[in-house]
Amino acid sequence: MAFSDFLKKALSRFRRVVIAASSVAAIIWFVFFDSYSLVTRIKLHREKAELTKSNALLRSEMNRLTDILSRDLTPMEIERFAREKYFMSRTDETVYTVVQSDLTLKAPDK
């Protein structure tokens, strides 16, 4: 009786260890290695958030431009828009593009 009880307990422990190890292996597989793993889902969620934000900004810009185009523009406004956005000029003018620099001059430390 003592040996059979020992075998039953050992078999029961072995089953628990196998079930626990299988569960841990399955969890690790689903978190890291599966094609729809938790890591991949987190990356895709962050990318979706960035794209949603970008989409909202583009939609607001599109609405602003639609409002500009929907109103009646005077020839002066059309000319100003063409000069600012597309660097257009009259036939007798020369357009110089001014690029703003981020460089700042500092006095040397004493």
Image: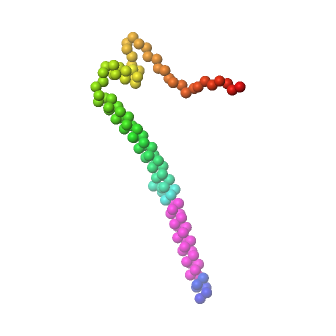
Q: Disc count in the image?
A: 0
* Colour treatment of the image: rainbow
Residue in the picture at 63% in, 25% down: 106
Q: Is 32 located above or below residue 54 in the figure? A: below
Give the side of residue 39 with respect to residue 89, left or right.
right
Give the side of residue 54 with respect to residue 24, left or right.
left
Q: Quadrant of the C terminus?
A: top right
Residue in the picture at 39% in, 40% down: 56
Q: Is 66 in the magenta?
A: no
Q: Quadrant of the N terminus?
A: bottom right
Q: Nearer the viewer, residue 75 or 4?
A: 75
The location of residue 54, given as percent across then percent down, is 42, 40
Q: Nearer the viewer, residue 45 or 6?
A: 45
The location of residue 70, given as percent across then percent down, is 29, 30
Q: Is 43 located above or below residue 93 in the figure? A: below
The residue lying furthest to the right in this view is 110
Give the side of residue 29 with respect to residue 86, left or right.
right
Q: Is 37 located above or below residue 105 in the figure? A: below
Give the side of residue 81 with respect to residue 36, left or right.
left
* Extent of the magenta region: 7-29
The location of residue 48, given as percent across then percent down, is 43, 46
Determine the main secondary structure of the stretch shown in magenta.
helix
Residue in the picture at 45% in, 55% down: 36
The location of residue 12, given as percent across then percent down, is 55, 77
Q: Is 15 in the magenta?
A: yes
The quadrant in which residue 58 appears is top left
The residue lying furthest to the bottom in this view is 1
The quadrant in which residue 79 appears is top left
Residue in the picture at 45% in, 43% down: 50
The residue lying furthest to the front in this view is 110
